[in-house]
Image (cartoon, helix red, strand yellow):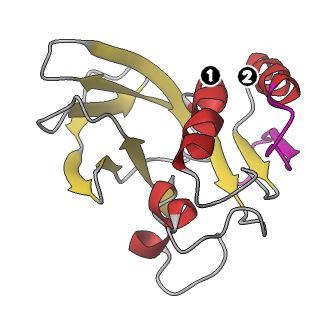
Amino acid sequence: VTTGPNRFALVIEDPEIKTAPGVRFSVVGSSTTSTANVRKIDGLWVAELGDLAAGPQHQYTVTLDSGVVIGPVPFYAGRKEQDSFSFAAFGDTRTGHDVHRALVLAIARENVDFVVHSGDIVETGGVKSQWERFFQIEGPLMSKSLLLPAIGNHDTSPRQYFSRYFLFEQYNEGRRYY
């Protein structure tokens, strides 16, 4: 989740994780690493990665209290002004999960810098299992590319899952755009 210029948040939802995971990040190839501030927000573990330089590839590693290590996972915090970048755009993934999965796997092979989702992420925004399925399908892509989602009419509900998972209220500073 993008939280501002050169700042991102890594969001982890797993009820089995009882203590804050350790999250470290660095520029790929650098011996200097930083430790993310990790806190719990609405049942989600949120690791805040800040002061990320545009241009070089970064990586993060998550260490769980069970000893399981995830990563290193490479990502970009943006490109320098003169550098080219690539992105993918798609939407309306609310049904047709096989097509969604095939699309995600194809895009993940392309090494895009970010993905724009035009909305209608799920069929019914108030059904948590639909969000869980979406994130399970998106996993291979979201682990390496930033997702910039727009909220569609199917994604809204009083349960506010879109805002919860994309940390909309925590980081939007009153804006309705990225």
Does the CB distance between marks 2 and 1 fall below 8 Å?
yes
Q: Circle 2 is placed at which residue position?
A: 108
Mark before the other along the chain sequence, 2 or 1: 2
Q: Magenta segment range?
A: 79-97
Mark 2 to mark 1: distance in Å?
7 Å
Horizontal placement of 91 versus 34: left or right? right
Judging depth in this view, the residue of 96 and 104 nearest the camera is 96
Determine if residue 163 is in view.
Answer: yes
Determine if residue 80 is in view.
Answer: no
Residue 112 among those drawn in magenta: no
Tell me which residue sits at (88%, 26%) in the image: 99
Q: Main secondary structure of the magenta part?
A: loop
Judging depth in this view, the residue of 128 and 80 nearest the camera is 128
Mark 2: amino acid: Ala
Q: Which structural element holds mark 1? A: helix
Q: Residue furthest top?
A: 68
Residue 84 among those drawn in magenta: yes
- Estimate the x, y position of residue 161 in percent, counting from the top left: 52, 60
Tell me which residue sits at (26%, 31%) in the image: 24
Q: Circle 1 is placed at which residue position?
A: 140
Q: Is residue 76 above or below residue 89?
A: above
